[in-house]
Image: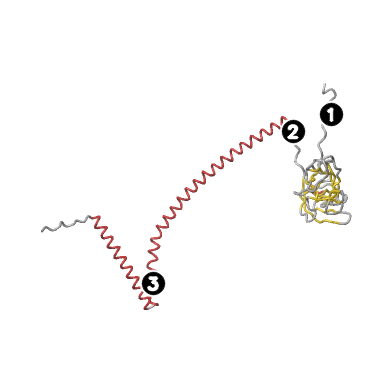
Amino acid sequence: MAWPPRQSWTSFSRRERNRALFSAIGSALALLAGLILLLMSRADPAQGRGLRAAALDGVAPVWAWTKAPLAWAQGVADDVDAYFDAVDRVKELEARMARQQRLREQRDALLRENAQLKAMLRVVEPGARWSRTVAIAGASSGSYVRSAVVAGGRAEGLRVGQPVRIDDGLVGRVVETGEHAARVLLLTDMSSLVPVRVVRTGRPAIVAGVNEALLEVRYVAPADGPLRVGDRLVTSGDGGVFPPDVPVAVVTGFKGELPVARPVARMQGLGYVTVEAPWLPPLPPPPAPAGAGK
């Protein structure tokens, strides 16, 4: 009977077989060492702690050596991710800059068109209005006078007759000035009279202070009916001093047949106010020369 031919091993197969053998031996030795350490720690805890410490000292350098390439590889991966993130962000910023450029060009075109239309229509724009923001230094609320003292006077440009307001609405007007202080007559003072306009109807009226929290509205009812609760009152600009369309008060009810309104600007607790230059209504156009229509 013939024997089967002897199997021949290539060098690659031998390397793989040796590697598997060494891996099995290493795993067995590591397992055996672990069991020995476990048994010794149970038999002699003090000696077991020493062996564990020695094993830790031996393993730590190896772990640090093997961890270094992993950390380097992780750093390279983070750098690659950061690069691609930076590229995406640059593309996003470029797209945003392109949109902003288009909007800027549209704005410039509208400004040029607006300037051309103003030139064609000969529109005259008013200059910037003078204003100063000053702090309230004190207030009085007697039986006959409702006023406030502001920390600003002639040295700061304040003059008698200038309107005083806050963002919400009208506060009053300057009635006395010192070098560095001035007195403001509030809307609620009985000497205060402000020409206003009813927003709903466009009709004129007068708002008068009566030394109380609410204001009286002296209004002659036209054909379109009397005032209503909730009607908003703004300055009309009649007679100058107060510029038009500044909020003044809101109608809250009636005292008898007389409408009463609550000031839009709260007179109590004022901190800072804005003093503006008196408003001057535009001059009427000059009369046409004789014979111009012929």
Q: Contact (CB < 8 A) between labels 3 and 1? A: no
Residue 184 shows up from this direction: no
Residue 158, how many percent across, how many down? 81, 47
- Quadrant of the image containing the C terminus: top right
First in residue order: circle 3 vs circle 1: 3
Distance from label 2 to label 1 (Cα)? 19 Å
Q: Residue furthest bottom?
A: 44
Q: Residue furthest left?
A: 1
Residue tagged 2: 123
Residue 249, how many percent across, how many down? 80, 48
Residue 220, how many percent across, how many down? 86, 43
Residue 3 shows up from this direction: yes
Q: Tag 3: residue type?
A: Arg
Q: Secondary structure at mark 1?
A: loop
Residue tagged 3: 52
The quarter of the picture where residue 101 lies is: top right
Q: Contact (CB < 8 A) between labels 2 and 1? A: no
Q: Name the residue located 76 percent from the left edge and 52 percent from the top edge.
A: 272
Q: Name the residue located 13 percent from the left edge and 58 percent from the top edge.
A: 3
